[in-house]
Image (cartoon, rainbow, N blue to C red):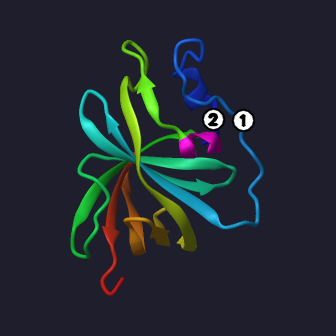
Amino acid sequence: MGLEAYNSKRDFLKTTEPSGSQKPAGASASRFVVQKHTASHLHYDFRLEMDGVLKSWAVPKGVPEQPGIRRLAVQTEDHPLDYITFEGVIPEGEYGAGRVEIWDSGTFVLNEKDSKKIEFALKGGKLAGSYVLIHTGEDNWLMLKKKGA
């Protein structure tokens, strides 16, 4: 996806959100973050460090913490890697206006990735275990924690 969509939606003179460029993918441990976003509707933004950006999904009801719970995850634009530590208030009138707080963060191991499925294991402060994102069409994905994870 790249960062063109991200940059086009923001006025960096008005918001403290990080601007950034896509960075080459490194060989170090991959990071994730879950940000609680109190915007027009409370939701959680789930982000995985991949391909030099943060691949991002809005999860309205939050990342499932127990197996058997399925959650809608709507893919959004890629975000710059610097967004992984962003907390603050996006001003009224700006895209995504509202408070952003880090709810959890850590590292992940990518087990499988193709156009229809992403499987990974999270190791965070609150979230741990094996998860899967299943592409169901358009920007919609289904997120679930795998059993025994």
Which image quadrant for residue 83? top right
Q: Which quadrant holds the N terminus?
A: top right
User: Which residue type carries mark 1?
Assistant: Ser
Q: Between 72 and 105, which is closer to the camera in this rendering?
A: 105
64 part of magenta stretch: no
Which image quadrant for residue 97? top left
Q: Mark 1 to mark 2: distance in Å?
A: 7 Å
Dominant secondary structure of the residues highlighted in magenta in the image? helix
Determine the secondary structure under disc 2.
loop
Which image quadrant for residue 13? top right
Residue ID at (75%, 45%): 23
x and y, in percent, of residue 135 in the image: 40, 59
Residue on which the image places disc 2 = 3
In this picture, residue 79 sits left or right of residue 125: right
In this picture, residue 43 sits left or right of residue 129: left
Relative vertical location of residue 50 with respect to residue 40 in this rendering, above or below:
below
x and y, in percent, of residue 123 in the image: 48, 71
Mark 2, other Cα within 10 Å: few <14 / some 14–19 / many ≥20? some
Residue on which the image places disc 1 = 21
| Magenta residues (range) | 80-85
x and y, in percent, of residue 100 in the image: 40, 36
Q: Which quadrant holds the C terminus?
A: bottom left
Q: Between 114 and 104, which is closer to the camera in this rendering?
A: 104
